[in-house]
């Protein structure tokens, strides 16, 4: 077993394990940790706990310290620099007429790197843009192309149900969603009905998929045992349509 704490760097980002190095960290505590990108500022979402060794990605990086007031001030300054970097990048993209959409800008905590997230329908030659940005910020520049689902997660919005997007409110990871899930749930296959604002199949199609799959498996098992046959199942209604020989359908 290994003692760890769980840290997030974004409100709905992935949870990463770190060695608490003797500190007792409560949930919600701002922390500074050592990462592959250098020092980063995050929030502890999992307090000290023991986990199986096979759940820990080695090498296990260490907690540097619980965040101090100075660290919090530094993070506020980083957020201001991100806003300035975004404005300048948008200006440079327009000047060079590049077919890309800037989504988000992220400074590392120690300001050693600036990461620009963007979307584009195809490949973009942004080498000259990188040179423009590096000449201004005097630090390492990275441009990263992301998909439309990641864009929706970063920007947020409202879904067809009227609620905040699942990906922007509580989902930390995207799970595969297929058209088969919509078919199993007897939903309309009209793309406008089953697609989210990102243009991809809605994540919520996955939520009840297992219920329908279990119902279908139970239906098949009942038919294999013989006797009355199950013609159809309605998991949402918790009902089966059963046909007895010579007696039509019953429910």
Image (cartoon, rainbow, N blue to C red):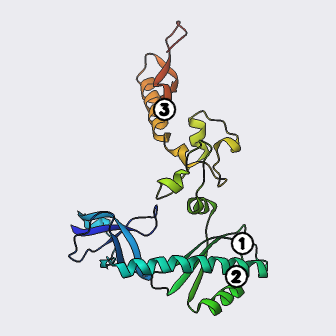
Q: Residues within 10 Å of mark 2 (few under 14, many from 20)?
A: some
Q: Residue at x 67, y 90 (%)?
A: 131
The residue under label 1 is 100
The residue under label 2 is 126
Residue 216: assigned label: 3
Secondary structure beneath dot 3 equals helix
Residue 55 sits above or below residue 31 on the image:
above
Residue 15 in picture, x, y percent from top left: 39, 65
Q: Please tell me which residue lies in front, 68 or 239.
A: 68
Q: CA distance from mark 3 to mark 2?
A: 50 Å
Residue 175 in view in this figure: no
Lower position in the chain sequence, tag 3 or tag 2: 2
Check contact, mark 1 vs mark 2: CB within 8 A.
yes
Q: Residues within 10 Å of mark 3 (few under 14, many from 20)?
A: some
Residue 214 in picture, x, y percent from top left: 44, 35
Residue 132 in picture, x, y percent from top left: 68, 89
Residue 41 sits above or below residue 231 on the image:
below
As drawn, is 63 to the left or to the right of 98? left
């Amino acid at each position: 077993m290994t003692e760890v704490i769980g840290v997030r760097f974004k409100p709905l980002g992935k949870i990463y394990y770190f060695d608490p190095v003797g500190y007792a960290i409560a949930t919600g505590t701002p922390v500074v940790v050592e990462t592959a990108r250098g020092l980063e500022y995050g929030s502890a979402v999992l307090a000290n706990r023991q986990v199986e060794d096979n759940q820990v990605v080695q090498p296990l990086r260490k907690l540097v310290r619980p965040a101090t007031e100075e660290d919090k001030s530094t993070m506020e300054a980083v957020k201001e620099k991100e806003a300035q970097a975004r404005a300048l990048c948008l200006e440079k993209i327009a000047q060079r007429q590049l077919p890309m959409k800037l989504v988000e800008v992220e400074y590392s905590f120690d300001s050693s790197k600036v990461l620009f997230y963007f979307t584009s329908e195809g490949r973009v030659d942004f080498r000259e843009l990188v040179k423009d940005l590096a000449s201004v910020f005097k630090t390492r520049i990275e441009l990263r192309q992301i998909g439309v689902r990641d864009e929706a997660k970063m920007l947020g919005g409202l879904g067809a149900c009227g609620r905040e997007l699942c990906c922007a409110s509580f989902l930390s990871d995207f799970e595969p969603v297929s058209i088969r899930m919509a078919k199993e749930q007897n939903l309309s296959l009209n793309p406008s009905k089953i697609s989210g604002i990102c243009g991809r199949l809605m994540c919520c199609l996955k939520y009840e998929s297992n219920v329908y799959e279990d119902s279908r498996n139970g239906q098949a098992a009942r038919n294999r045992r013989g006797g009355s046959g199950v013609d159809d199942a309605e998991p949402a209604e918790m009902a089966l349509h059963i046909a007895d020989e010579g007696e039509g359908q019953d429910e």
